[in-house]
């Protein structure tokens, strides 16, 4: 129990201009989609979910949205190509619908490329309700530089160790809804286990880019529940591959990630059992 933090904080106050908005979220990770939906439902914000770029484009043909959250790394049409198509082919301007990049790290040197494609701002994963709200307010006011500075600052403030698991933010977002917390934790176990197994298979076949992609995909939920040690292992693997390194330790690091996940999943299952 000492390894798990789960205090509940007071919910944020949502301005009138935010409540009632209609937002589209495009992310291929189930955990992230569930998280966005829960937050926006509690804010009284209309929310539609898509798990790939093509599905998002089909939704945009049928409906208008005030804001779009876009993951960049997705199978098929990635977020950058999807955003360009929205701006250049569908003629949906930034003023009509800002596009906010969902990112696990500040884009930094490639930020100009995203801006030129029509991305208005970005929010770092994992995020708090307060950070999400400030990003939306900034994007609606076309204050992308302010949003950029705020999210970079949040990144620097969110790098400390918090024990094996820290469920503070998850409970805060849930507003005390234990069923939602349980659903998110079960989703974390399912999607992380699947991602780690796919990483291991790709590493055995030396499909390094696939290893990096799977690692990137499951890092955000790890950080969101405060699984710092597992996140650090996954991040180390991804960085080595992105830097064109192929150290012999990648396969052993993948095994370490599986071992760490086994310990974390046991803690989570014990926590879920006590919630019943």
Image (cartoon, grey):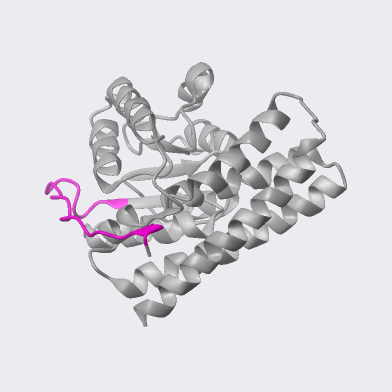
Compared to residue 223, the image places residue 39 above or below, namely below
Q: Nearer the viewer, residue 196 or 80?
A: 196
Residue 170 is covered by the magenta coloring: no
Q: Residue at coordinates 33% horizontally, 62% vertically from top-left?
A: 38
Left or right: where does residue 14 sit relative to residue 119? left
Residue 7 is covered by the magenta coloring: yes
Left or right: where does residue 213 sit relative to residue 204? left
Q: Return the x and y of residue 248 as percentages of the image width and height.
A: 82, 35
Q: Nearer the viewer, residue 79 or 179?
A: 179
Where is the C terminus found, in terms of image quarters? bottom left
Residue 98 shows in this picture: yes
Residue 72 figure quarter = top right
Q: Residue at coordinates 29% horizontally, 32% vertically from top-left?
A: 139
Where is the N terminus found, in terms of image quarters? bottom left
Compared to residue 20, the image places residue 272 above or below, namely below
Q: Return the x and y of residue 176 as percentages of the image width and height.
A: 24, 68
Q: Nearer the viewer, residue 91 or 207?
A: 207
- Judged from this view, the residue extending furthest toward the front is 2
Q: Residue at coordinates 32% horizontally, 37% vertically from top-left?
A: 96
Left or right: where does residue 42 sit relative to residue 65? left
Magenta stretch bounds: 2-22
Q: Residue at coordinates 57% horizontally, 61% vertically from top-left?
A: 263
Residue 78 shows in this picture: no
Q: Return the x and y of residue 163 as percentages of the image width and height.
A: 42, 49
Task: Assign the magenta stretch its main secondary structure.
Answer: loop
């Amino acid at each position: 129990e000492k390894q798990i933090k789960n205090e509940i904080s007071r919910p944020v106050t949502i301005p009138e201009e935010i409540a009632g908005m209609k937002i589209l979220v495009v992310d291929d990770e189930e955990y992230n989609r569930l998280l966005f939906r829960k937050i926006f439902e509690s804010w009284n914000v209309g929310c539609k979910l898509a798990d790939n770029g093509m599905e998002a484009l089909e939704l945009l043909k049928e409906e208008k949205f005030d804001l779009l959250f876009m993951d960049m790394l997705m199978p098929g049409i990635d977020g950058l190509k999807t955003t360009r198509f929205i701006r250049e082919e569908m003629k949906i301007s930034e003023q009509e619908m800002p596009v906010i990049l969902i990112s696990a790290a500040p884009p930094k040197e490639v930020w100009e490329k995203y801006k030129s494609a029509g991305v208005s701002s970005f929010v770092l994963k994992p995020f708090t309700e307060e950070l999400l709200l400030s990003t939306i307010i900034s994007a609606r006011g076309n204050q992308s530089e302010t949003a950029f500075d705020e999210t970079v600052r949040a990144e620097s403030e969110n790098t400390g160790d918090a024990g094996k698991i820290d469920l503070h933010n998850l409970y805060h977002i849930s507003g005390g809804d234990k069923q939602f917390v349980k659903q998110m934790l079960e989703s974390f176990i399912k999607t992380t286990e699947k991602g780690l197994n796919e990483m291991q298979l790709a590493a055995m076949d030396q499909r390094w880019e696939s290893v990096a992609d799977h690692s990137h995909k499951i890092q955000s939920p790890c950080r969101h529940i405060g699984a710092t040690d597992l996140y650090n292992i996954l991040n180390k693997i991804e960085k080595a591959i992105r830097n064109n390194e192929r150290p012999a330790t990648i396969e052993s690091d993948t095994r370490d990630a599986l071992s760490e996940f086994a310990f974390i999943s046991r803690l989570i299952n014990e926590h879920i059992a006590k919630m019943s």
